[in-house]
Image: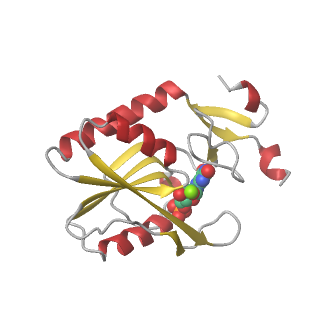
Amino acid sequence: MKPDHVADDLKNVLMSREEIDQVVRDLAARIDEDYKGRDLLLVGVLKGAVMIMADLSRELKMNVSMDWMAVSSYGSGTQSSGVVRILKDLDTDLMGRDVLIVEDIIDSGLTLSWLVSNLKSRGPRSLEICTFLRKPDAIKVDIDVKYVGRDIPNEFVVGYGLDFAEKYRNLDALGTLAPHVYQSE
Ligand code: XMP
Ligand code: MG
């Protein structure tokens, strides 16, 4: 079911709130198991990962620390270029830490690939990636992603943290946009 206030803007709903919750529970169970007894730092990538970070962290049955980074990737139009600028850096020293990057979506993978090498250079004990969504058909670089919530088709999606022109982040479902929305921009 499309939420009423965006019914005209969405082409279809890819994941309902219930499906999202199940994906988050499954990710959390794996992370709980893998990091048992360790001191985990979750690094959320602003702004898209806010929802997955909030839900995933509360689903975990362990103490974690959380920090945030904001990056912007330069590119033409909607394509990311892999040239990244840090808008907000971490407050936490990563030296010797077990670090898990929490992402909303991996598209080309260029942004994340840059982020991984940047964070690796700070000397963490371990560094892994958890992404809510991945578009396998869009990937351009080889990155090792340990936790993937759901693979989706190569279409622009919004909701659950993901935006189009800063809109739709607060939808509790995940949907694809109707063409009239992006064609009118
Ligand atoms: P790359 O291509 O470097 O880009 O993996 C990842 C970032 O691009 C944004 N992105 C999207 N945002 N719906 C969105 O709202 C999408 O379908 C989408 N695909 C990529 C997002 O910010 C992600 O972190
Ligand atoms: Mg983003």
Above or below — where is 17 with respect to 44?
A: above
Residue 136 screen position, x and y as percent: 47, 53
Visible residue check, residue 113: yes
Query: Which residue: 69% across, 51% down?
Result: 166
- The quarter of the rendering in which ligand 1 is drawn is bottom right
Locate the N terminus and report the quarter of the image it occupies.
top right
Query: Which residue: 46% across, 43% down?
Result: 52
Asked if residue 98 lies left or right of residue 135, the reply is: left
Asked if residue 12 lies left or right of residue 178, the reply is: left
Query: Which residue: 31% across, 38% down?
Result: 28
Front position in the image: 30 or 85 = 85
Query: Which residue: 50% across, 47% down?
Result: 50
Asked if residue 181 lies left or right of residue 97, the reply is: right
Residue at the extreme front of the image, as rendered: 91
Instruction: Locate residue 21: give its quadrant.
Output: top left
Residue 125 screen position, x and y as percent: 20, 65
Visible residue check, residue 107: no
